[in-house]
Amino acid sequence: MTSFTFQISHSTTPYELLVLILNKRANTMMLRGEHPNDFILKVCGQEEYLIGDYPLIQFNYIQDCLAKDITPTLITLNVESVSLDQDNGPENPDVDALQRTRPSFSTLTLRKKGKHVSAWKIDDPFVFTVNGISRLNCDAAHRTVEIGLQAGLFHGGKSLCESQKTKETIVSSDGSCEWEETLRFDIKVKDIPRMARLCFVLYEISKTSKGLKSRRLVKDSKQEFFINPLCWANTTIYDFKSQLKTGAMTLYTWTYAEDMQNDDLLHPLGTVVSNPHIDRAAALMLTFPNYGKDKSVLYPTPEKMVEYARKLRESATERIMQEEPNQENDINKFQQLEQLRSLADRDPLHELHEQEKKTMWALRHHCLHEIPTVLAKLLQCVEWNDHKEVAEATALIQQWPALPVEKALELLDYAYADQNVRSFAVRCLLDVSDEDLSLYLLQLAQALKHENYLSCDLTEFLLGRALNNQRIGHYLFWHLRSEMQVGSVSVRFGLILEAYCRGSQQHMRALFKQMECLDKLRCASEQVKQKKDRKAALQTFQDFIQEPHCQEALSNVLNPLDPSFRWKHLKIEKCRVMDSKMRPLWLVFENADPFGEDIYLILKHGDDLRQDMLTLQMLRIMDKLWKREGLDLRMNPYGCISTENRVGMIEVVLNAETIANIQKEKGTFSATAAFRRGSLLAWLKDHNHTEAALNKAIEEFTLSCAGYCVATYVLGIADRHSDNIMVKKTGQLFHVDFGHILGHFKEKFGFRRERVPFVLTNDFVHVINKGQTKKGQAVEFQRFQSHCEQAFLILRQHGGLILSLFAMMISTGLPELSSEKDLNYLRDTLVLEMSESEAQKHFRSKFDEALCNSWKTSLNWASHNMAKNNKTI
């Protein structure tokens, strides 16, 4: 292959570069008559092409190459030789026709077909009857079990009125009992919001505490009793047609997860879907009355709500005009506006006081016209159990200007249940670029769990964008596919996946090929785990992979981790079984592009990679926020994807070594290697022979160390030992293995093993100072500290976004992110209640603490190295 090297302007387009290439070919190879329109530029080693009349600098591949200081490598191909995966014909419907082809289950259809009455005309209190329960797994055949049921009405995680309880009763030996008891709630039907959910918990009364969720019960002064929750269930008050539920209903309950952290017995953030495993779930029987008698009770449409709000405002305006103007009121309003501006800067978790809520709600029209970004906080002021305020909120939403993406995302977390609010948030995302959408796709996929119904604007938005961009479709597919074993989302996610695959059948075939490949690798991993000896494990792997059915499945596959790469086949001789407990597989594939480099991946089976995915995604977002402010901290958030329950893939970062191995290589004795400050610098010198190369490596180390110091501190990334911090030969430092976040630090004998805000050891400082040992801080180190402070302050400016993204992940099922309490760690590290100068001072104290106590980290690393060596002896 003939290659040429060009120096070009950053504004050069692909077409202009093709002209240069063809002119060069014509002059050197005597190839005449070639036209740029007959050729296309392909990224070497990837399934990506540079097309369109855009400057080359705008293409991600070019930007990545410049960031890594490598020369972009492109290949010219004849257009006719490129086979595009396209879906043609009736199998691939027009994406824009999605809205036009929606099934006719709207409330408008219902209104035409039958008689109905508006829910806002029902003044009766909300009631329903608890009939009984069956198939309760509580060992009632061998002991006396006394149970009760508690029910509550919630909207976005907030209670709408006081919860109600049934009388306690004894369970029959077959696990059933009857109540036939009517529960009456202190709320009128007209005041129940459209997206309200009814939550249940079934609990046992016993003399002993069972589990973390047990509560003391004052029943008899002589005897202590406990409430022990057994199972829970949630359901919506209105069905997907906006019709109030009536008649008999059976809910199949869920058991509590062992690690679920929630102070309340009720679980309003849980799914509203009945447990699909009905054969092993308790069945709760209920009966709802028909308030409309012979008519259906329907919730008003947004149009009716806006009209209702207009009439309320008109009558309120008449009353105000009859009152005399008051100068004191004008002064108070000015003060309130100032207070409003200060409230707008508070973080999403800031709890507004009652007076602040009243002030903000009174000034809601000022919010609309002057501070529209305060919408999320304004919605916290709405009394969702008052239909008049709900009508006013709906009317405001219709007028609200579009919000920036960062603010719109906040409206899609669990706290904002209202359908009109969530639809507005989706409208704000319509113009987001594919690149930014990819950045937030993990959270948006999780936000589907906060939707009461399958058919919603968020589902349609994600499907539409996925069908228009196969890369987005790829990641949406795997985000949903990886949770198909979760009963609460399996039906919903399965239907969304089916809709996507039906709309993109060519891509479906590629995805099926990936699934087939991963299935073979998972089977290989299962066989490997059965072998204790590594040699035997490797032989087992090689024998299995060489079988014809595996060879076929593992050939010509798009990389699930990054679909811009395609591999030809597995290089069995380069694969190996790794040391760790779960026996990950080190896999090497030959690139399908003959000019591309091999593809290195690690298959993990047995570890939940979702937390790693979240942490790495947050590192990418932090990197983008820093770069937007002109601060490139050389971050390396490598690829990671979860493909099914406890199965996933991780990108291998080549030419990198762990701190532990570097210290072992350069230290004379492993127990003291962690204390030798010159080992890391010596290792960098071994791989960077010239002064210029070494200085560049030290700069890479300094910048990346600053980035990871701040990121690990803010995110509370724990278990930072010398085997999960790595350094590339180019000097770039990065962290791996994010099994503990948000301050869930490991303990030993009741003491925290990590007692520093972040890792900044003597050997790190030695590299940053370029090996200087003079007294006082070197200029290089002062610059490093300045980078850390700047990075921290930038993250604080976007603290609301960081909190919102984590809040959207609460329903994921991650043990270390299961309640709003876990988010408080982020609030504490970002000190969002402080001024910028106070926050900078606070961070400096943490920086000094990390520096002064670095010997503790070295001590931990020394004990880690010794423990690891003892295991391998």
Image (spheres, helix red, strand yellow):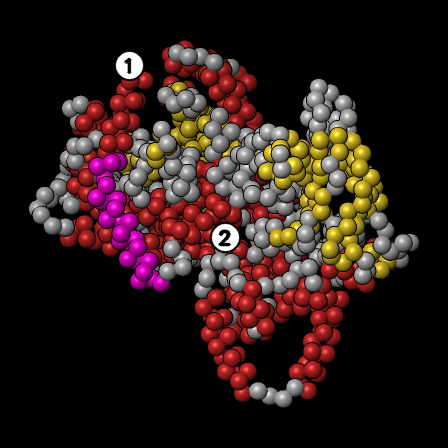
Name the secondary structure under disc 1: loop
The region drawn magenta spans 835-857
Q: Residue at (47%, 52%) from the top-left corner?
A: 803
Would you say residue 63 is visible in this rendering?
yes
Residue at image x 48%, y 25%? 605
Q: Give the quarter of the image for residue 635.
A: top left
Q: Which mark is residue 873?
A: 1
Rounded to the nearest angstrom, the CA distance separating label 2 from label 1 is: 47 Å
State whether residue 795 is above or below residue 483: below
Provide the residue designation for mark 2.
804
Question: What kind of secondary structure does the magenta stretch mostly adopt?
Answer: helix
Report whether 122 appears left or right of 655: right
Closer to the camera, 379 or 54? 379
Q: Residue furthest left?
A: 774
Total marks in image: 2
Q: Position of residue 758 (x, y in %)?
A: 30, 43
The residue drawn where x is 49% and y is 55% is 349
